[in-house]
Image (tube, helix red, strand yellow):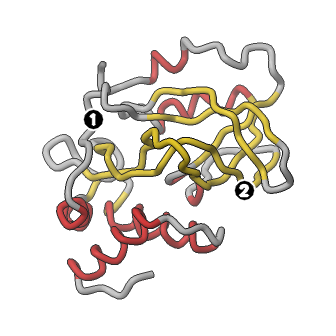
Amino acid sequence: MALDTTALNRQMTHFDGHDAIWLFGYGSLIWKVDFPYIQRRPAHIHGWSRRFWQGSHDHRGTPEAPGRVATLVREPGAVCHGMAYRITQEVLAPLDVREKNGYLREVVPLHFADGESEEGLIYLATEENAAFLGDAPLDAIAEQIARAHGPSGPNRDYLLHLAEALRDLEVDDPHVFALASRLAQATDTPRR
């Protein structure tokens, strides 16, 4: 698969004819909301775990020194918490550009604290995309994050903002928090 998935995402028609759709954010879409939305609600999805296994060649790193950002991996019994946004169709075009580095839209059931469920979209980067880096020891991932820097800023900021946003949501994510702790140790900076 090509690195730039913008055109592939724009061919998807999951929600044609809908006035508004739900979008689930599990990474920077939790804390970096630079798009208009109708409604915002904490939500979760089943069967997925958040992992820093996707390379970032365009935002938090460069092609020569990619950063690492979140994607989802299937894990039976897992629950991934994040933020859901009710958006109009027009918002998808700029999001497709933002998430172009290997992410494809996929439809998933979203679950809300009140027991309500709705269909929604996620941007998912699987191992089939050219930017996928995969699993590595946590210390190695933290070192890569500590070194990487791209047009959107230091990779470390992405990780630390995500950890802070999850704490604000009162969500325990052992993978994210272990990486944030190792990053603090690797860079001798206090943990946020």
17 w.r.t. 103: above or below: above
The residue under label 2 is: 42
Quarter of the figure that contains the N terminus: top left
Determine whether, in the image, residue 117 is placed left or right of residue 13: right
| Residue 184 percent location from the top left of the image | 30, 80
| Residue 142 percent location from the top left of the image | 25, 65
Instruction: Kindly identify the residue that appears in the image at 41 percent across and 50 percent down.
Output: 70
Instruction: Kindly identify the residue that appears in the image at 32 percent across and 42 percent down.
Output: 58
Tell me which amino acid carries mark 1: Ala
28 w.r.t. 2: above or below: below
Q: Quadrant of residue 167?
A: bottom right
The mark closer to the camera, 1 or 2, is 2
**Disc 2 packing (10 Å; few <14; some 14–19; many ≥20):** some
Query: Between residues 152 and 155, which one lies in front from this camera angle?
Result: 155
Helix, strand or loop status at disc 1: loop
Quarter of the figure that contains the C terminus: bottom left
Instruction: Kindly identify the residue that appears in the image at 58 percent across and 14 percent down.
Output: 12
How far apart marks 1 and 2 lie (CA) works out to 28 Å
Q: Earlier in the sequence, mark 1 or mark 2?
A: 2
Query: Between residues 160 and 134, which one lies in front from this camera angle?
Result: 134
Residue 131 image label: 1
Q: Quadrant of residue 18?
A: top right
Tell me which amino acid carries mark 2: Pro
Instruction: Kindly identify the residue that appears in the image at 35 percent across and 48 percent down.
Output: 59
Q: Quadrant of residue 181?
A: bottom left
Helix, strand or loop status at disc 2: strand
Query: Between residues 71 and 88, which one lies in front from this camera angle?
Result: 71
Whether label 1 touches label 2, CB < 8 Å: no
